[in-house]
Amino acid sequence: MPPALSLERHLSAIAACNQAWLPWQWLALALAGLAVWLAWSGRAGTDRLVALLLGLFWLAGGLGFLGRFLGEINPMAKVFGWLCALQGVAFLAWGLWPGAGPGFWPRRDGQGVTGAVILVYGLIMLPLLDIWQGLAWPRLPLVGLFPTPTALLTFGLLLWTRRPVPLGLLLIPIAWALLDSYASVVLGLFPEAALAMAGVAACALLLPRLQGSKLHW
């Protein structure tokens, strides 16, 4: 299949998903902003809500875009859709598990700054770069309904945690980051390829903190 045709079908799947979910993607975008604000505030109890929101976003991206829309033109997308849905369940469990809340609060070090950079890129720069590249609504993948911006949101927020992050919460996002970045380069969607760098940076900063954690999923 010619690359241009593959790109066209991929963008058509994004457009179909956006049109089917209208206007819920705008609510998802607002909830993503709320998640960042709650994580930044560090208020007691709000960290679990942030984890639950991440869980809902991964479920929506996995069962919605990958499972239903992209899965119609690429059977492998359904496989990754179920994996993303599993990731969503893992975040829901993390948020509800007694004594295992994430403890969000931006760290005043390189890890916290890296998380902030990833969040700004995923929520603001990525849509702007996509528009600059020539994409227009409804072919814009927005956070909350699509795995790539959701993964950027995830990496950024996980870098704002004060407690060790379970290893199981990193496996699927980093696998998706590497695969999707490769596919993005092949399709010419270069802004999305930054996901791999974000994933590698997040893992490099988070994995050392697993030592001593009592929750190694």
Image (spheres, rainbow, N blue to C red):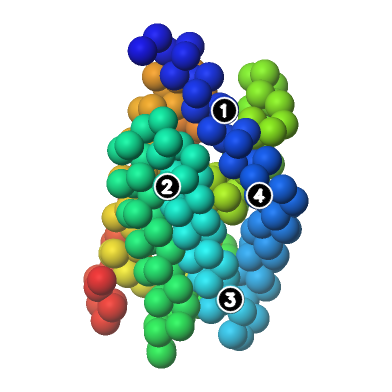
Residue 212: tell me if it is visible.
yes
Q: Residue at x 63, y 65 (%)?
A: 35
**Badge 1 density bin: few <14, some 14–19, many ≥20, Cα 10 Å:** some
Residue 195: tell me if it is visible.
no
Q: In the displayed structure, would residue 110 be above or below residue 92?
A: above
Secondary structure state at the residue bearing disc 3: helix
Q: Residue at x 42, y 13 (%)?
A: 3
Q: Which residue is mark 3?
A: 49
Q: In the displayed structure, would residue 171 be above or below residue 42?
A: above
**Badge 3 density bin: few <14, some 14–19, many ≥20, Cα 10 Å:** some
Q: Tell which circle, 1 or 3, labels the residue nearer the N-terminal end.
A: 1
Secondary structure state at the residue bearing disc 4: helix
Total numbered labels: 4
Q: Which residue is mark 1?
A: 12
Q: Which residue is mark 4?
A: 21
Q: Quadrant of the C terminus?
A: bottom left
Depth check, front residue: 63 or 92:
63
Q: In the displayed structure, would residue 128 be above or below residue 84?
A: above
Name the kind of residue labelled 2 in the image. Answer: Gly
**Badge 4 density bin: few <14, some 14–19, many ≥20, Cα 10 Å:** some
Depth check, front residue: 31 or 201:
31
- Foreground mark, 3 or 4, reads 4
Cα separation between marks 2 and 1: 15 Å
Q: Tell which circle, 2 or 4, labels the residue nearer the N-terminal end.
A: 4
Name the kind of residue labelled 4 in the image. Answer: Trp
Q: Tell which circle, 3 or 4, labels the residue nearer the N-terminal end.
A: 4
Cα separation between marks 2 and 3: 25 Å
Q: Residue at x 44, y 52 (%)?
A: 62
Q: Which residue is mark 2?
A: 67
Q: Tell which circle, 4 or 1, labels the residue nearer the N-terminal end.
A: 1
